[in-house]
Image (cartoon, rainbow, N blue to C red):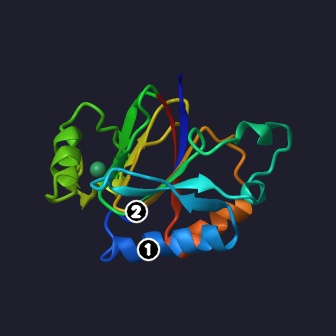
Amino acid sequence: MSESIVSFVPQVLEYEDPAEVASKLSRYLSTHKVIGTELKNHPNAPFKRFAPGPNYREILSCGDEFNQVEGTNNNHIDIFSERTVFHGYNNGLDEVLCPKCQQNLIGTNWAETMDRWAKGGSGLFQCENCGNIAPISAYRFSSESQFRWAFSNVGISFYNWPPTFTEDFLTRIAGILESPVVIVHAHL
Ligand SMILES: [Zn+2]
């Protein structure tokens, strides 16, 4: 079965206390009954997994697609609190844009920085064009079709939900995360 995943990821590469930020997210969503019970999960997983709650429609804006969110196994919500690369799987990548000079660095060694950071090392990446050094999350990873990748130790993923999340929801989670949010669409 193919799966679609929509993730919301702050542009903050690392929070000092990612577990606290992740629990603020889950508190907000569970107070509004958008997420329900916590589901069984591998003990070493970098996220907590939840079933949709009875009010999941509250964060969606479009009617006909609501019936796609059913059951508890195919429409779960994962809230991350460890370093994670949120990538597009089958949605490719065409651009890695420097935040300073806008050069496309797709042909450079950004993947080494990504792997080093994911394993616990530094996430600083230097632009070979202008010399700018910035966290890898400050670079714009995207495809021509506007699919994005993102990097953080906090994030939230919705499995097989319609992609009609409301502006209000986006504004609220950006407020909780204290950061602009990148939307990552993935297909497995
Ligand atoms: Zn640059």
Left or right of residue 53, residue 49 in this image: left
Q: Which residue lies at the image location 20% right of the left edge and 58% below the top edge?
A: 124
Q: Within 10 Å of the Cα at label 1, are there few (<14), some (14-19), or many (20+) other Cα atoms?
A: many
The disc placed on residue 21 is 1
Mark 2 lies on residue = 154
Q: Residue furthest right?
A: 63
Residue 184 visible in rendering: yes
State which quadrant residue 128 falls in: top left
x, y percent for residue 68:
72, 36
Q: Which amino acid does label 1 sit on?
A: Val
Q: Nearer the viewer, residue 137 or 154?
A: 154
Q: On the rendered structure, is 187 left or right of 110?
A: right
Q: Is residue 10 above or below residue 98?
A: below
In what element is the residue under mark 1? helix
Q: Which residue is drawn at 34% across and 38% down?
A: 104
Q: Where is residue 172 in the image (x, y as percent from the top left)?
A: 64, 70
> Residue 162, relative to residue 46: is it above or below?
above
- The answer to whether 103 appears left or right of 7 in the picture is left
For mark 2, give the secondary structure.
loop
Q: In terms of sequence position, does the residue under pointer 1 or pointer 2 come before the other?
A: 1
Q: Residue at 18% of width from left, 38% of height from top?
A: 109
Mark 2 close to ligand 1, CB under 8 Å:
no
Number of the label disc, if any, that sits on residue 4? none
Identify which residue, 15 or 53, lies in the foreground.
53
Give residue 35's position: percent from left, percent from top: 62, 60
Identify the amino acid type marked 2.
Val
